[in-house]
Image: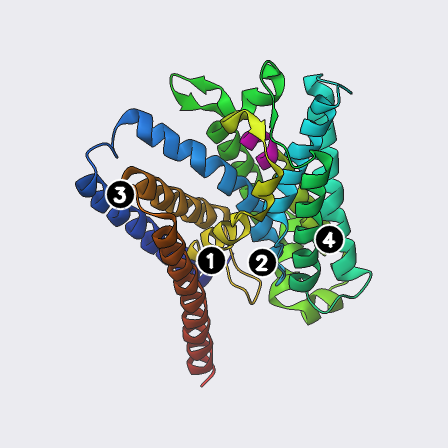
Amino acid sequence: MTKTKKSSNLMTYAGTFGALLILCIVLSIASPNFFKYSNLMSVLKQTSFNALVSTGMLLCLITAGIDLSVGANATFCACLCGMLVQKGITSNSIVLLIVAIVAGTFIGWVNGMMSTRLHQPHPFVSTLGMKNVLWGAALIVTGSQMVSFSGINGVMWLGSATVGGFPISFIVVLVIYVIMHILLTRTSLGRSIYCCGGNPEAARLSGINSANVLTFCYALSGFMAALAGIVSIGRSGICNGANANQPYDTDAIAACIIGGASFMGGKGTMIGTMLGALIIAVLRNGFSLLSVSAAVQNLVLGLVIIGAVLLDVTRERMEARARRLATK
């Protein structure tokens, strides 16, 4: 990583962390309950789900793609486990976890294959279609009913267990983020991922198999979505197919873009994405504490996403201008 890129990343981290700090201060003034230990742990639990789906989303964004099916994939994996419990097929925790992870990874692999081998014009279209497919499938497999996982502690453990009140799910997220950070910054695969998104022609000339790299990224996105689905079961104790239409994908996109990723590809870090996920979680927690109506929540989050896109565009223009000046 060049000194210029390191400097740019540090500036992004500082700006994102500053925004998070200001948001926390404002909410602590607006609600005396914000800085209570129980509420802060609740924020971390909320962060866990979005941080996991944002991991997959980040990989896709780095390759100049997108995965709009991450939230629906997470819900479908949870509902698939719910169907096995509902119909009395099995309530074995290990089997349910394996089914969820295999299903989520397979769906991600299919997304990758559609984007590469079938030469879809852009993953936006294919993954949006997959989102709707999974939404319908989640409702079908559960008969449009909520399914309880009461008593199946092995499945619920990841999303519900705590150590001194600190959520296990967030500890798992931190471990995953460290591993992913090493993958992206210290391995040839990580460099290939950045190269495929930042300079596809250079990737081709370097002999990088872009199709395989992209397929890997989408399969890993599906794997992360499955883990998020398992976490959601532990948080609520149920699965609900209707949740497949929740704006989980937009939350993930916002977290990645706020954290420094770009729709143009070739950019994004795990540290920045974590900070972005924390901002989204704090914002949603603040809405809950202040009893903000759903209409206002949607309005504000919509503005946040628009702001994130404008930030991305502005950042790209500034960097392009700096490159032009450097060549003169």
Residue that label 2 marks:
61
Please report the residue visible at 29 percent of the width from the left and 41 percent of the height from the top: 291
Asked whether residue 212 is in view, the answer is no
- Give the CA separation, mark 3 to mark 4: 37 Å
- Decide: few, some or many residues near mark 4? Use Cα within 10 Å; few <14, some 14-19, many ≥20: many
Residue that label 3 marks:
24
What amino acid is found at the position of numbered circle 1 in the picture? Ile
What amino acid is found at the position of numbered circle 2 in the picture? Leu
Q: Is residue 293 magenta?
A: no
Residue that label 1 marks:
257
- Decide: few, some or many residues near mark 1? Use Cα within 10 Å; few <14, some 14-19, many ≥20: many
- x%, y% of residue 258? 42, 56
Please report the residue visible at 68 percent of the width from the left and 18 percent of the height from the top: 93
- Give the CA separation, mark 1 to mark 2: 9 Å
Mark closest to the chain's N terminus, 1 or 2: 2
Which of the numbered marks, if any, corresponds to residue 115? none
Q: In the rendered view, would you say 39 is above or below 17?
A: above
What amino acid is found at the position of numbered circle 4 in the picture? Asn
Say left or right for 77 vs 39.
Answer: right
Asked whether residue 116 is in view, the answer is yes
Which of the numbered marks, if any, corresponds to residue 111? 4
* Label 4 SS: helix
- Give the CA separation, mark 3 to mark 1: 20 Å
Which residues fall within the magenta stretch? 228-233
Residue 137 in which image quadrant: top right
- Give the CA separation, mark 4 to mark 1: 21 Å
The reply to whether discs 1 and 2 touch (Cβ–Cβ < 8 Å) is: yes
Q: Is residue 231 magenta?
A: yes
- Give the CA separation, mark 3 to mark 2: 28 Å
